[in-house]
Image (cartoon, rainbow, N blue to C red):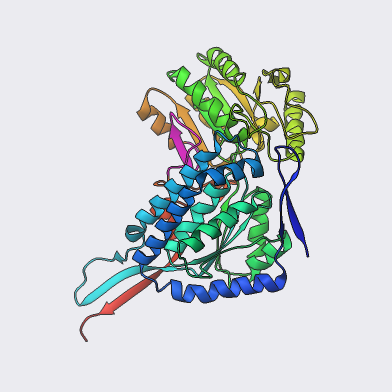
Amino acid sequence: MNVQRTITPVDGTVYCERPLASDTELDAILERARQAQRAWRNTDLATRAAVCRRFCDLFESKRDEIALELTWQMGRPIGYSPSEVRGTLERARYMVDIAAEALADVDAGPKDNFRRFVRREPLGVVLTIAAWNYPYLIAVNSVVPAIMAGNTVVLKHSAQTPLCAERFAECFREAGLPEGVFQAVHLSHASAERAMRDPRVDFVAFTGSVAGGHAVQHAVSERFIGTGLELGGCDPAYLRHDADLAHAVESLVDGAFFNSGQSCCGIQRIYVHERLYDDFVAGAIELTNRYVLGNPTSPDTTLGPVVRTAAAEQIRRQIAASIAAGAMPSIDERHFPQSRAGTPYLAPQLLLGVSNHMPVMREEIFGPVAGVMKVGGDDEAVALMNDSDFGLTAAVWTRDVEAGAALGDRIATGTFFVNRCDYLDPALAWVGVKDSGRGCTLSRVGYEHLTRPKSFHIRLKT
């Protein structure tokens, strides 16, 4: 029997072990999903909504245990882990509430002697492959709306956060969801690829690396099924000359370092108008030095470890490469004595004197690192923000909201913020461009990717 082991970044011990599904077990899971979908697609929307609302209530009732498990699995400070529970519930409940409108027939308008409309039909079986950094938030984006739309779901979670998939399964089971409509499975990479190629899978929702996205596309390349790919970013922010400096400092430091910088939509590139540059740098350094790096199970900790030691070493190499290219570190690592080579505990870092060719401004660095660059104005900032292979989110700080919104039309990004960053509003489409991915989750638009349109053209009298 093949077993996956979850090593907690808290202390390097084995937190849990789970057997990986065999080919025979995977075959049975996919068959159950296919059979269950035939009945679930004909279940009325009100019944689906009632089950999903009970799921939310049960999930909320387990929030303390879920938050603690989350901290141990991926290292987020216990003071912040409950925010993921709240965010998961916000998204799930919103997608349930809008389902009737989002899935309603689309009337094509009057035509003599005809009734014409477009109906949104479920795709079938949705395979969700979720990442560890926001394990519930990432999964819920596709899981709940897929079920609400009449699909069945098979969730394969990261080996770092297997208990998250099991919590979903537990809450759906207790909520009365029929057997086979939602199933959690622990799979090897090879078995996950096999599932994607299986004709019983009708859609793949994947969150992970760019390389992982290419692997998904390759796996389904001989099939005509859809994929949703959220693949990360190297997200920029720009402070115009008229920005509220104090608000920008607070928001951007949090946007860069929350979750130890392990966020696809975290801020990594900060462009600051020359009038504000010195004051912004001073404020950002002072605020960064207030972080408390340490054991994430302690309520005093505000910056936890990154997910694993190998990840920390990769981040250190990317910082070192940027410094070798001319960047200047502004945070003294000695201020964070818990930061040590050979561990996942890593000090935050703001790199100054950067240029857009450096790793910190070009690569996704999944850690507590950001580069800060001085610019002369809007045109330079826009050009630099667009000079990236990624396009997930971008943010502008300005007191002139209309000018800020106008800049959004010029920036290649999936989500554009003015005077905030690093947040998903479930009423808005979550989407990336360029290497940040394809497809869409959340909002009523998200339902379009989990259904297929079917046109009805009915002559009333012959």
Q: Is residue 385 magenta?
A: no
Q: Is residue 348 visible?
A: yes
Residue at position x 46%, y 37% in the image:
416
Quadrant where the image shows the N terminus: bottom right
Side of 233 relative to 60 (left or right): right
Q: Residue furthest bottom?
A: 462
Quadrant where the image shows the C terminus: bottom left
Q: Is residue 240 visible?
A: no
Which of 22 and 432 lies nearest the eye of the viewer? 22
Q: Main secondary structure of the magenta part?
A: loop
Q: Quadrant of residue 367?
A: top right
Which of 340 and 456 lies nearest the eye of the viewer? 340
Which of 399 and 208 lies nearest the eye of the viewer? 208
Residue at position x 56%, y 42% in the image:
67
Residue at position x 57%, y 74% in the image:
32
Q: Position of residue 394 (x, y in %)?
A: 50, 35
Which of 245 and 356 lies nearest the eye of the viewer? 245
Q: Position of residue 296 (x, y in %)?
A: 64, 33
What is the magenta range? Answer: 411-425
Q: Position of residue 145 (x, y in %)?
A: 45, 58
Q: Is residue 24 above or below residue 135?
A: below
Side of 51 relative to 434 (left or right): left
